[in-house]
Amino acid sequence: MNNTTINIPSADILHLIQSHLTECGLHTTSSTLRSESGFNMCGLFPNSKGVLVTSATEGRWGEVLQLLESLDLERVRRGYLEDYSCAQRDDVGGEKKEGDDGDGGNAGGEDKEYSSIVMPLEKAVAMAHEMTILELAEQNEVELAYATLRMCSTMLDRALQVTDENDVDDLLDNRNNNHSNNNLGMILSRSGDVERRIAALTSMRRSSSSSAATPSSSNSAALLPANYYGPSNPTKQKRRDQIAKLFKRHVPEIPLKRLSSLLQQSVKWQCHTGTFPTVQRLFQSTEEEEEDHNGVVEEEGGGGVEGGKKKKKKKRKKNTTIEQKFDLVLGNVDMMMMIGDGKKKRKNDETGSSVERIPSRLHQTIRLGKKSYIESACFLTDGKGLVTGSSDGFIEVWGEPINNQDAAAASNSNNSNGLNSLLSTDIDFEKLRTSDLPYQRNDDLMMHDSSVLAMNVSHDGTLLGTTSSDGTVCVWKIADGKLLRKIERAHGGIGGISDKGAAVTCIQFSPDGSKILTGGHDSTCREFGLLTSRMLKEFRGHKSYVNCCSYVVLPPSVVGVNGGSNSGNSHRGDSNGFLAVITASADGSVRLWNGRTAEPIREITPPIPTSANAVIHDKDSIVRSKSIHTVVHLHSPPNTMIVVPRCDRVYLMSYSGAVLRVYTRDDVQGSDFLAATVGASNQFLFVAADDGKCVVFDVHTGKVEKIIRSFAEDCSSSVGRSTGKACEISGLVCHPHRGFVGGYSNDKGQKRGILTLWK
């Protein structure tokens, strides 16, 4: 066939999308698509089909009818009739091979003949409805049985006939499909026969109850007319088993991940034919002028020592390999140029999109004043600013935009051959942001009375929440630097003798920005309302310091309903999901809480090696303990998180507590991880170790992609006085949109605090 175009019906596309939505658990979206398009499922998934067979065997007909309701019987019937017509055509063609003149004569009678055909699945569905009616009548629900019979009478009369033979055996026999019912001896309609059986049952029980003095319900239920459940007088369980076998054989089974597999096959074929630019390499030869440092020549008329010589330029041909990668969703092409002996240089397409790159060189450095070091830092949500909190209580926003002239000069000075070089130099993070923040230009900075231990920016990027070592929590408006809320002694010290509260080590805004979540050294996590500045909930259960806390919206199926003291409606979220709270503590545990009731749902303890905890004497100590200092929630893989304890390994875990992957170094063992962060695309995991190196893992494979060996040395202003080692990294930050990673240390031995950005 020369025609390579395949016409795919839109109904099949809708069926694929509907199956994919159901497989992903998006049942509400799938139901909406079903109601708007009018198409049901073309089959059942393997697990749903197993439930159907089991329910039919056990007589749970409500579940059976609910599953059958989602089937598109018309589509199954069309496919069945197509196969049947092809088989009939082959048989007729073999018999009339000598004189092929019967096609026109049969054309008018084929539709009438096919309309009388009843496929096996239609018969099985009708038998399920019939069995439902008969069992309702047996359970003395006679009125409901008659009402159901009136609704299903048309289907029963069309699909089933009253015969003296066992129609189930005919359906199970592949050699006799019994497509047409013309050869069967019809006694009366199937609905009338079912009504006759129910009437016989009712009459028998009425006569039995009138003759017996004290009729019992068990004896009444045992009275059944002959052949009540079918020819040859089968038992109820035998009839159930027969229907279950029919479902197992004739209900279509939808293969798992059908849509994704079709897309993969399509991409592979387009790559094979060359129409798809993925993994397509184009070789080209370019001439570039390179400086030859070995040869020098005399310059005419040159009298100076330095001016009399010049470098000789030599033209060399270099092979350049361009590897194109195609984004299936966005349609962008990302090109990787391989120049010379393996050096790679990335080029972007005209849209400016590129994949995430691993930082490899120093970019910019933020420097504080003397004897002041950085305790916390975070990027603004738009990525155009970096906020730092220092040991002396100052909160500063860095990132001054570079004007167009300076940006053009920076672009020329960098000699960028790739596109969009301006994207990496349009923000100068080494300068305070004063162009649109006048309060910083006037030296009217936001500040605490003590060290700023944690900070977080609201989702809309307008509010900044900060905490301090004296237990104070503040909420600022970033645009004008005004203090909107101040909560003193947020953790500990409330009602006590001491005026100083416990240190607050973590903070996060709620998804709607109306509440804040904090954790502190009093081993609790608390939620405060920004409208009243009062504590709304307290999450109590940890045995040591709470190092991090966060809100996370999870599917209810991931959380389950068995956690906490109440397993009812208290664990149900709204239509968007279940609002949960995740906390991690120095006691080595991660806890999952109900975000609405503050009830504990699950305690997760990663399998930290015992060697890392051998020196622990105080269970509440965080010094050289199994303290979990970082938990990062991932969007890919879904419903997973990165758990980072102070040991030599990092864990990828599900919210049910299962360990999915363990990240360890292959160059050295026994080096503890101090801080961690994940890139915006969830592709790379950056972990700072106590030996001064930054290890970059691939999140999906667990492979060590890169080790930045001088990371701690470049992210601190001095080395330790006694040990000679670089200062320990206390925090990492990652740009929300670009491949920037920053590190800082709060070591008091530094001359001044610095934060170094890598790109």
Image (cartoon, grey):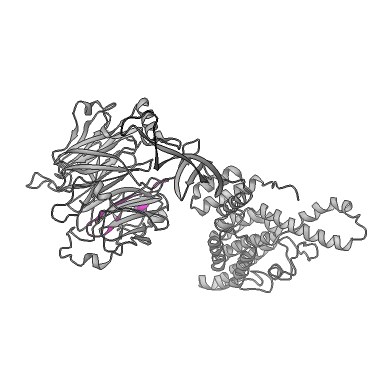
Residue 288 vertical position relative to residue 719 in the rendered view, above or below: above
> Residue at point 53% right, 47% down?
31
- Would residue 453 be seen by someone viewing this image from the given angle? no
Of all residues, the one furthest to the right in this rendering is 99
- Would residue 638 be seen by someone viewing this image from the given angle? yes
Q: Quadrant of residue 58?
A: bottom right
- Residue 538 appears at what percent x and percent y? 23, 49
Left or right, residue 126 beside residue 378: right
| Camera-nearest residue between 243 and 743 | 743
Left or right, residue 685 beside residue 439: right
The reply to whether the magenta stretch includes residue 273 is: no
Left or right, residue 195 beside residue 592: right
The reply to whether the magenta stretch includes residue 587 is: yes
Q: Quadrant of residue 445?
A: top left
- Residue 157 appears at what percent x and percent y? 71, 58
The quarter of the picture where the C terminus appears is: top left
- Residue 195 appears at what percent x and percent y? 66, 61
Residue 79 vertical position relative to residue 404 in the rendered view, above or below: below
> Residue at point 35% right, 30% down?
302
> Residue at point 38% right, 41% down?
738
**Residue segment shown in magenta:** 571-591
